[in-house]
Image: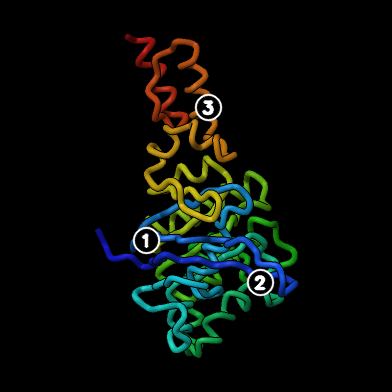
């Protein structure tokens, strides 16, 4: 296995209260987790489980109260490595409007590289390539505020790609999108991972999206409680539901069929797998 690009070593973090007398519960506590180079890792958990805090800790936007977060062996608490860390791990948040800063799409994508002092010809190359990767090159002269939600999110992702990170952390990037927008953003993210080899940490509450990952990490009560392949995670439907999460629709349907004495396998994830499973039973 490759080396970890992000490592959480017994990390605890709590937000500051508005009043000095009140001590808030830890947003993450005693968190140990390794994200390896080239992985596509989905992170699941209900609201308040610590997912978004994990995203912000991953590139030093937040610093641990105790423990360490290492990015390519660099400690996020080390100020002198801050720029290198943020170049290594980029973060995309839920609302693209919060990350778009310019009035023209290509200018917005160029913003990050310009701040790094990249020469203009290289910025031009990065901007064009990043927009092509996410399917937004033909919109490079458009005004971002006139784009759809899915298009804006793809522009935000292009802005991170232009920084040439080795890892991208996405915090529920499709939560505000319609099904078409979710599909387009998901396709762009999968391409980043499969074709460009960029490590992806994908925080989502859509179970079907999580099925696309190589690995799923489930958080509850500020800690990691499950870690495995999508088949391993979703085959334990009782544990998933016990923490307030659902399972993919295919898994639900397969479970209902099994409860009706139809002997299907318990690790079916996709519609095609379910159809093939039923077909085998009919032919048998």
Which-is-in-front pick, marks 2 and 3? 2
SS class of the residue under badge 2?
Answer: loop
SS class of the residue under badge 1?
Answer: strand
- Residue 216, compared with residue 16, is above or below; it is above
Residue 100, label in figure: none
Q: How many numbered badges does the structure rendering display? A: 3
The quarter of the displayed image where residue 85 is located? bottom left
> Closest to the observer: 110 or 87?
87
Residue 154 image point, x, y percent: 58, 61
Residue 116: in sight, yes or no?
Answer: yes
How crowded pointer 2 is (Cα within 10 Å; few <14, some 14-19, many 20+) is rated as few
Residue at (52%, 75%) from the top-left corner? Answer: 63
> Closest to the observer: 267 or 189?
267
Look at mark 3 in the image and give the residue it sits on.
252
Horizontal side of residue 14 vs 250, given as left or right? right
Residue 137: in sight, yes or no?
Answer: no
Residue at (57%, 39%) from the top-left corner? Answer: 245
SS class of the residue under badge 3?
Answer: helix
Look at mark 1 in the image and give the residue it sits on.
34
Residue 107 image point, x, y percent: 62, 78
């Amino acid at each position: 296995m490759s080396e970890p690009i992000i490592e959480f070593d017994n990390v605890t973090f709590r937000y500051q209260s508005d009043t000095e007398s009140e001590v808030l519960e830890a947003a993450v506590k005693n968190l140990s987790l390794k994200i390896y180079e080239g992985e596509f890792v989905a992170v699941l958990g209900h609201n308040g489980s610590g997912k978004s805090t994990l995203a912000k800790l991953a590139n030093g936007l937040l610093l641990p109260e105790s423990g360490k977060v290492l990015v390519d062996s660099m400690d996020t608490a080390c100020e002198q490595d801050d720029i290198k860390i943020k170049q290594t791990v980029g973060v995309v948040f839920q609302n693209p409007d919060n990350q778009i800063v310019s009035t023209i799409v290509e200018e917005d994508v160029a913003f990050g590289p310009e701040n790094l002092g990249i020469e203009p010809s290289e910025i031009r190359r990065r901007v064009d390539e990043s927009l092509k990767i996410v399917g937004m090159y033909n919109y490079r002269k458009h005004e971002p505020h006139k784009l759809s939600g899915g298009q804006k999110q793809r522009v935000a992702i292009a802005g991170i790609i232009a920084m040439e990170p080795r890892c991208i952390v996405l915090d529920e990037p499709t939560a505000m999108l319609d099904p078409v927008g979710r599909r387009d953003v998901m396709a762009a993210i999968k391409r980043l991972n499969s074709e460009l080899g960029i490590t992806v940490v994908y925080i989502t509450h859509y179970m079907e999206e999580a099925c696309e990952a190589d690995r799923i990490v489930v958080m509850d009560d500020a800690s990691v409680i499950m870690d495995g392949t999508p088949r391993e995670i979703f085959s334990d439907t009782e544990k998933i539901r016990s923490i307030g999460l659902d399972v993919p629709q295919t898994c639900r349907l397969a479970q209902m069929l099994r409860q009706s004495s139809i002997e299907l396998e318990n690790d079916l994830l996709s519609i095609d797998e379910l159809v093939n499973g039923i077909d085998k039973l009919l032919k048998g």
